[in-house]
Image: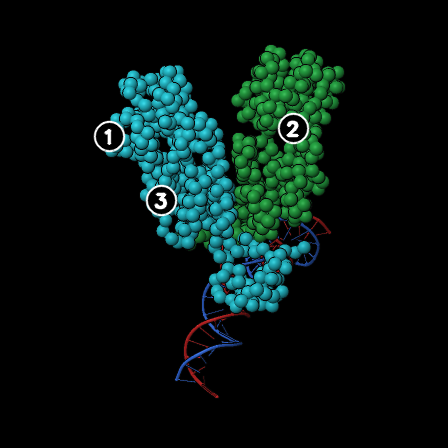
Chain colours: A green, B cyan, C blue, D red
Amino acid sequence: MRTVTIADVARHAGVAVSTVSYVLSGKRAISATTRQRVLDSVRVLGYHPNAGARALASKRANVIALVLPLRAGMNLPVLMQFATSVVATARQYDHDVLLMTADEGPDGIRRVAASAMVDGLLLMDVEVRDTRVPLLRDLAEPSVLIGFPADAEGLTCVDLDFNQAGALCAAHLAGRGHREIALLGAPEVVYERGTGFAERTRAGFLAEATGRGLHAVAVPCEETYDEVASAVKLLFDAHPGLTGLVVHNEAAVGHVLGALRALGRAVPEDVSVVAICPDDIAERARLTSVLIPAEELGREAVRLLMAKLDGLPAGSILLEPRLTIRESTR
Amino acid sequence: MRTVTIADVARHAGVAVSTVSYVLSGKRAISATTRQRVLDSVRVLGYHPNAGARALASKRANVIALVLPLRAGMNLPVLMQFATSVVATARQYDHDVLLMTADEGPDGIRRVAASAMVDGLLLMDVEVRDTRVPLLRDLAEPSVLIGFPADAEGLTCVDLDFNQAGALCAAHLAGRGHREIALLGAPEVVYERGTGFAERTRAGFLAEATGRGLHAVAVPCEETYDEVASAVKLLFDAHPGLTGLVVHNEAAVGHVLGALRALGRAVPEDVSVVAICPDDIAERARLTSVLIPAEELGREAVRLLMAKLDGLPAGSILLEPRLTIRESTR
DNA sequence: GTCAGGTGTCGAAGCGCTTCGAAATCATTT
DNA sequence: AAATGATTTCGAAGCGCTTCGACACCTGAC
């Protein structure tokens, strides 16, 4: 059973090879009758274009690379939703997805790009000082990052709009009548590193709260139970009237609840808690939250990459946060 | 910055294109000096073979497809470990991985296979009556399945040896002096469907227990708390002397522990529990268990696929189960 | 009736690589 | 010194597709 080539289709339809190609790509006008005849032959013979030959001739592989941080410690549901969404969206644009793990590092990226195996790259979870970022910057192949590295200049990134997310949380608490609120953020070092998302959340939170005339503070928050508990205690000691808490630290969120319980403050009766974290965590603890929109992230990332592949300019985009109200705020 | 081709390398090294090719593929002997000269040129010019051209000429894409059931309800850690292991192992064999989701169905498989995009396929979580199985059977491209479909004839499958796993659990309990033990298995329907793994576990369990002169029973087990609780209650009513329990039902294992607590039977003081389930579940509940060896599964699956790609015959294989002793048995 | 300008189709030239057969080179043997 | 056989290298023919320029034909304008 030799595989069917475009020449077989051309012969069967009684046209030239190039005509078949044009029918299939639509890059030149072909009369309706010829067109139909070719399409029939394609179906009858069960023709599928050879990907390698097509890539060679057209310099387009119709494949994008998805570089995932397949290491422990990732939030798996988020990762999965993201990957699923990327594959599905890519298929809509008639592209396939090559899966790579981050541990091949820059070399892996260079390899697949230079071999023309993929037309573009999607990188998830880029670190602030990622060794791959400079590489991406002067790679011929376009790329899109999920999250923002320290210097996003010249790169296309997609992420949740953390500034707005912080503001949204503050606004939610304000709307419920809270007058004194606080943000428990990322660990100290994350701010020191100048990681964008942590700071932006804080800025958005403080600006919104202040704008609405609330009393608001923002403090960093470590991730062990003891540190979280003491941070929470200090916070309430300093601000006894505190009734609203925003937690932007997925590792600490469970501990915060434990600490509140230990302090005898009931949620949501005494204090309302809003989290900014993956949906599964919030769902499990029944927390009002702003979720990480993994599916939308994947969709938008692919959309941007496809635009770049078409030579269109593509700036970074921020996704609008949405609040899901559960049982931890009143 | 034109991309470097094999012709550039040949020119730079002062040899024929074919010589470069042979140096790189090792398919013909090349003298050490020429060889070194070519290799140097490759490095100096930063040459990476064009994947499409290579695939076209050699009829080998050096890519395998990984078809994952990216739907809700999967055990994510297992899936991740598996995917990671597949990618890493494939790289060792100089192959890349094309990620596909099961929801493209048979057409997706036909498409990537016919387009010569991939040389072989790896399918995870094949269902008992999977519409893709007949297709795989008469596909030119080799494939390996994780898990066994109803009729595995003519297919290459990899799975945990559930028969031995059942036996191992029985042996463990026997070794600890338990004389009367039971297996809580999959829901009734799973057995009715004739799903291999459930039955094999039961057979192995019963054979081993009987062989060692124990009193053993095996009952199906649904997955809601109420059904689990009543099944557990019935079991202990019928066999008051029961002190060992094997649970082969990852959805029910939590409920079983709850039901035992409700019955006032302490684990492991009154009854020892062994689970056959993914490691994260067992770990969380501190259960002695036989885990699903995701990483090994991925590695072996790739190994088998590579063997088939080399034209070697490859039968199905069963991985030997291993018991991790935790705090639920004594 | 002729010519400009469309349409629709064809032929051929690659794209960058692998692989086959043959040529060239060298070391042995007679 | 010639012949033999290994060893090493070369040249050229594809692999299946896209794409460019050109050709053939048809239309309508003059």
Q: Secondary structure at mark 3?
A: loop
The secondary element bearing badge 2 is classed as loop
**Where residue A27 appears, x then y in whole percent?**
60, 48
Q: Which residue is mark 1?
A: B213
Q: Which residue is mark 2?
A: A186
Read off the residue under disc 3.
B316
Which callout, 1 or 2, points to the residue nearer the camera?
1
Q: Can you give x and y, in whole percent of width and height, for residue B149 in the image?
A: 36, 38
In the rendered view of the protein, which quadrant contains the C terminus of chain B?
Answer: top left
Q: Secondary structure at mark 1?
A: loop
Chain under callout 3: B
Q: Which residue is nearer to you in this view: B257 or A140?
A: B257
Say if residue A144 shows up in the picture: yes
Residue in view at x 50 percent, y 45 percent: B88
Any part of residue B199 in sight: no
Q: Quadrant of residue A327?
A: top right
Q: CA distance from mark 3 to mark 1?
A: 32 Å
Q: Is residue B225 left or right of residue A237?
A: left
